[in-house]
């Protein structure tokens, strides 16, 4: 995410890019950038780390007297060499991550500004939509800009035959010498049940979050592994409202 801030600065200075797209890891991992500034602040401002840093100068030095007494107790328990090594590490740690904390905060502000927007992508399965719901809810709590949601790999069928009717026809043909037709009808029944399950999952998500716009992209017969198929996905997306 820190790299995103650098790219944004270069784009504003040189006009290098019109659009920067960040493809994140799965939803819960993608939310790490929201917690990074707070986690770093909690770590760097922790009482134990403050204790190991040099005491303040001037009038504030009087406030560190209690910490000095505690430091002396810890030194007697652990030994002076260990404490000195830890202090050296803490000073280097603060110098290294102090600037990172500021940059992480700046990146968070960039992501919540008008320059950014979030587009959530998920498949219509229960687990995937549950992860997407967690992501959308967290973004809403943080007042992050959300453009909408793309539900990918949605199954469809051109045949308006119910699964019950398809299975009934398959049973009628089971005794005949038409194994391909029987198998096709059974597969169609399974497909229609899958379509019903996906529709139910998507409707539940939409009813719980009516303010999130949805675009649905039908499932393709093959995986997206080349530019031709990728362009087809783009055409399916562009064909939506």
Image (cartoon, rainbow, N blue to C red):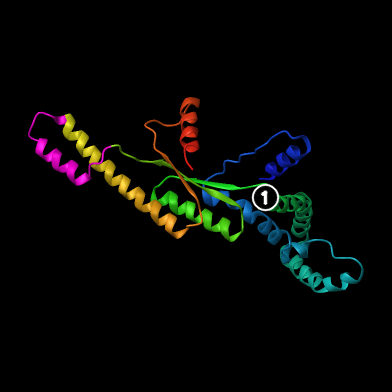
Q: Nearer the viewer, residue 29 or 82?
A: 29
How far across and down, in percent of the image, does residue 52 sit?
A: 77, 62
Quarter of the image where one finds residue 173: top left
Q: Is residue 49 shown left or right of residue 205?
A: right
Q: Nearer the viewer, residue 77 or 142?
A: 142
Q: Residue at x 25, y 41 (%)?
A: 160
- Magenta segment: does it hold 196? no
Q: Which residue has dot 1 on it?
A: 114
The residues colored magenta run 159-179
Q: Nearer the viewer, residue 157 or 74?
A: 157
How far across and down, in percent of the image, does residue 209 sit?
A: 48, 58
Q: Is residue 66 above or below residue 94?
A: below
Q: Nearer the viewer, residue 29 or 237?
A: 237
How far across and down, in percent of the image, does residue 36 sit?
A: 65, 54
How far across and down, in percent of the image, does residue 25 sit?
A: 54, 44
Q: Is residue 8 above or below residue 69?
A: above
Quarter in which the N terminus is drawn: top right
Q: Secondary structure at mark 1?
A: loop
Q: Residue at x 77, y 64 (%)?
A: 50
| Residue at the extreme right | 58
């Amino acid at each position: 995410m820190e790299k995103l801030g650098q790219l944004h600065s270069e784009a504003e200075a040189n006009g290098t890019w019109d659009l920067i797209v960040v493809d994140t890891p799965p939803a819960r991992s993608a939310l790490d950038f929201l917690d990074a500034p707070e986690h770093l602040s909690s770590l760097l401002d922790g009482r134990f780390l403050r204790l190991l840093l040099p005491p303040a100068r001037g009038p504030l030095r009087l406030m560190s007297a209690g910490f000095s007494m505690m430091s002396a107790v810890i030194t007697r328990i652990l030994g002076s060499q260990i404490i000195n090594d830890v202090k050296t590490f803490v000073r280097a740690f603060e110098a290294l991550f102090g600037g990172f904390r500021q940059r992480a905060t700046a990146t968070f502000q960039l992501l919540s500004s008008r320059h950014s927007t979030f587009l959530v992508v998920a498949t219509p399965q229960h687990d995937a939509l549950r992860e997407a719901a967690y992501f959308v809810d967290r973004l809403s709590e943080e007042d992050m800009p959300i453009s909408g949601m793309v539900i990918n790999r949605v199954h469809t069928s051109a045949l308006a035959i119910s699964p019950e009717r398809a299975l009934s026809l398959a049973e009628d043909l089971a005794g005949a010498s038409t194994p391909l037709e029987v198998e096709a009808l059974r597969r169609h029944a399974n497909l229609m049940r899958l379509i019903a399950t996906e529709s139910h999952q998507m409707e539940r998500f939409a009813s719980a979050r009516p303010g999130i716009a949805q675009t649905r992209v039908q499932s393709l017969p093959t995986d997206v592994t080349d530019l031709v198929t990728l362009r087809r996905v783009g055409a399916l997306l562009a064909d939506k409202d």
